[in-house]
Amino acid sequence: MTRLNVVLLAALLASALYLVRQSYDARRLFTELDRAQSAARQLETEYERLKAERQAQATPLRVEKTAREKLQMRTATPAVTQYVEWAAPASAAALLAPAASAAPEGTR
């Protein structure tokens, strides 16, 4: 009978230690989960802030201001605009003329 009591006591102590260890692991994992969720919320907040900042930086007025100040660019005006005229070579004009005259009357 004494031997049975010792075995049952050892089993009771082992199960109690196992229960304590499992409770400790569960608390530790819950704390890690809470920290990870907190970090995820912080990253999401930072992402939204960066997205808003990117949208603010990409406004047309901001782009124009940056182009003027940092890149030394200026707006195009008729005074500084140079137009290039393209004249088709004579052979190209001769090739295009028969095609225009061969078109049906209603398509011209």
Image (cartoon, rainbow, N blue to C red):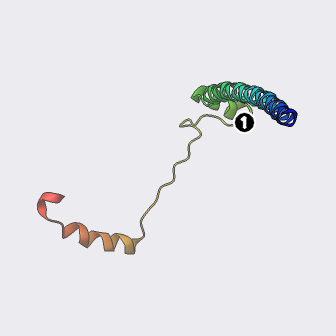
Q: Residue drawn 81% across and 33% down? A: 8
Report the number of numbered marks: 1
Residue 98 lies, in percent from the top left, at 24, 72
Instruction: Out of 6 and 75, give the one closest to the viewer.
Output: 6
Q: Residue drawn 38% across and 75% down? A: 91
Instruction: Out of 87 and 56, give the one closest to the viewer.
Output: 56
Q: Amino acid at mark 1?
A: Gln
Q: Quadrant of residue 100?
A: bottom left
Q: Residues within 10 Å of mark 1 (few under 14, many from 20)?
A: few
Q: Quadrant of residue 81?
A: top right
Q: Quadrant of the C terminus?
A: bottom left
Q: Residue furthest front?
A: 1
Secondary structure of the residue carrying tag 1 is: loop
Q: Residue drawn 63% across and 32% down? A: 63
Residue 67 lies, in percent from the top left, at 67, 35
Residue 20 is left or right of residue 95, and the answer is right
Q: Quadrant of residue 10?
A: top right
Q: Which residue is mark 1?
A: 72
User: Can you say whether 107 is above or below 32 in the image?
Assistant: below
Residue 74 lies, in percent from the top left, at 65, 35
Instruction: Out of 46 and 104, give the one closest to the viewer.
Output: 46
Residue 54 is left or right of residue 97, and the answer is right
Q: Residue drawn 44% across and 62% down? A: 87
Residue 60 is left or right of residue 10, and the answer is left
User: Can you say whether 19 is above or below 83 in the image?
Assistant: above
Q: Quadrant of the N terminus?
A: top right
Residue 23 lies, in percent from the top left, at 76, 27
